[in-house]
Image (cartoon, rainbow, N blue to C red):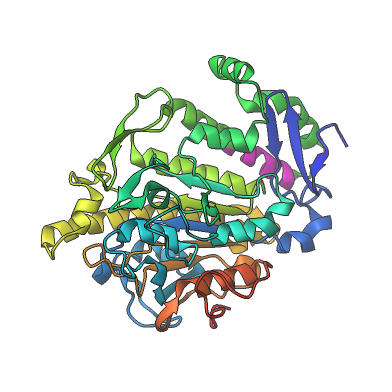
Amino acid sequence: MSRAGRAVGRRGFLQGAGALLALPWLEGVAGFGGAAQAGEDRGKQRLVFLYVPNGVHVPSWTPVGTGADYKLSPLLAPLAPFKQDLLVLGGLTADGARARGDGPGDHARSVAAFLTGVHPAKRGPIRCGISVDQVASRVLGRQTRLASLELGLEPGRSAGSCDSGYACAYSNNLSWRAPQTPQGKEIRPRQVFERLFGPKLSPKLKARRLAERKSVLDAIRGDAADLGRTLPRADRGRLDEYLTGVREVERAIESGERGTPDETEGASGLRETLPRGVPRDVRRHLRLMSDLLVLALQSDSTRVITFLIGNAGSNRTYRHLGVRAGHHSLSHHGRSKRKQEQIEKINQFHVSELVYLLGRLAAIKEGERRLLDQVALTYGSGIRDGDRYDHHDLPILVAGKLGGVLKPGRHVRFAAETPLANLWLSLLHGAGVPGRRHGDSTGALKGLG
C-alpha cells in the first residue's frame, strides 16, 4: 500500500502539507472502511440534531392519521420522497423550557432545555445540563478524529443577558459539555472546513495558503492518485465523487469570502455583524453548512453533530421569500392571517432545506446501505407555537434508521406530557451509548423500532 495508507483507527486518510483528508467508505480495501469491516460499519451509527427557532405554524404542521398510513401535512409535504425514512413524533414535551416561576424567557429556555432536559438557571451562575450530543460524543467520539461538531448560522454572545434576564449562553448554544459550559458553535464555513480537512497550521502558513488560493486537494493529489490505482472501479468512483464534493464545497467557501459583512438581528433587538466569510444569503449559508455536515459524516470525521439553524428568538428576515419582517416578531402573530402566512413561508423554507440535506445523505452509499440509513437525524423546536409559547406536543421529526434500530415511515403519537428526553435516551441506547436517565427522562420510548 502507498504512503497514503495510514489510518485513524481503521479508517484511512490522506495527508499532505496543510491537508488531512479522511477517506469515505471504500468497499474493496481493508483498512479503509471496506469489505473487511462490513460488520464494523454497520455499527457506525451517527446522531444529528437540528434546531429551528420560534416554533412552527401548527395547523400546517400536524399530519392527519397515525401509523404508516398517515397523510403528510402541507408543511411536511415536500418530505414526501423521504416519507419512508421519517418518524413524525407527537406528544413530546420539554418541561424544562417552562417558566417554573421564573417569568419570561421562553426562547432562551427552549434552546437550553431542548437537548439537556434541564431547566436553566435564570439567576446566579449559568447552570443547565449536559446535552445528549455530548453524552453520545463521550462514547462515539472515541472512534473519530472529532468527538463532535457544533454548527450554527447566527453569531451569538456568550456573556450578558439576551432574553428577559436569561444569559446569552442559553440563547446562543444548543450543545452543553457540562452544566456550566456550553459547547460553542461555529458559523464560519471556512473554520468548519479547516477543522475537517486542515491540520493545525501556524497562522502565517494558513494565511499564506489562503492568499495563494491553494486547495487542500493540491497537497494530497499525488497520494490520492497512488491510492486510486490500487482501488476497484467502484471505489475509484466513490473516491472521485468524494474529492469532487470536497472541492465544490471549498469553492463555495471561497466565493462566500468575497462578500462584505452583513448584520442580523437577535430577539433582544441588538444587531450583530456577521463574521467575514459568512455568506450574506441565508440560503447559501444554510446549504453550505449542510454540505459540510454531510462531508463530516461521509468522512467519518465525527458521528455526532448539532446544528442551530437560528438562535433563540431569532429575528432574522427572509427577504428572498418576500418576508421583510423578523422571524421572532412574526411568531407573535396574534392570529393575524398575514403574519401566519409569512411564518408558514419561513417554515417551508426550513423544511425544503431539510429535504436537500436528506437527499445528500440518501445519495451516499456505504456498502449496501445509504448513509441516511446509518443516521438518526432529529429536526425540531423547543417551542410549539411561537405566539403561545407552548412547550408540549413539540414539532419533532426523526429521519433515518440508525443502523436498523429505528423503523421509520410512521406518525407516532405518545401520551401527553411524555418527556422529550425519553427520545434522547432511546437514541442513545440505539447508538450503543449506555445510560439509565437523561435530563428529566422517565424511560426510553417504546414503538420506535
Q: Quadrant of residue 391?
A: bottom left
Look at the magenta stretch and give its main secondary structure: helix
Front-lying residue, 333 or 61: 333
Q: Is residue 369 left or right of residue 345?
A: right
At a point 76% along the width and 25% down the height, the residue shown is 222
Give the residue at x 70% y 44%.
145
| Residue furthest bottom in the image | 415
Q: Considering only vertical position in the picture, is 35 above or below 392?
A: above
Q: Position of residue 182 (x, y in %)?
A: 51, 50
- Please tell me whether residue 121 belongs to the stretch shown in magenta: no
Residue 313 visible in the displayed image = yes
Please provide percent x and percent y for residue 369: 65, 61
Task: Give the percent coordinates (x, y) of residue 167.
Answer: 38, 50
Q: Quadrant of residue 157?
A: top left
Q: Is residue 94 visible?
A: no
Quadrant assignment for the N terminus: top right
Q: How many marks?
A: 0
x and y percent of residue 250 in the render? Answer: 54, 31
Picture quadrant where residue 374 is located: bottom right
Residue 268 drawn above or below residue 128: above
Left or right of 254? Residue 343 is: left
Looking at this view, name the residue that lies furthest to the right. 1
Which residues lie in the magenta part? 234-245
- For this view, does 130 lie left or right of residue 332? right
The image shows residue 375, relative to residue 301, as above or below, that is below
User: Where is the C terminus found, in terms of image quarters?
Assistant: bottom right
Answer left or right for 47 relative to 55: right
Q: Residue 242: within the magenta?
A: yes
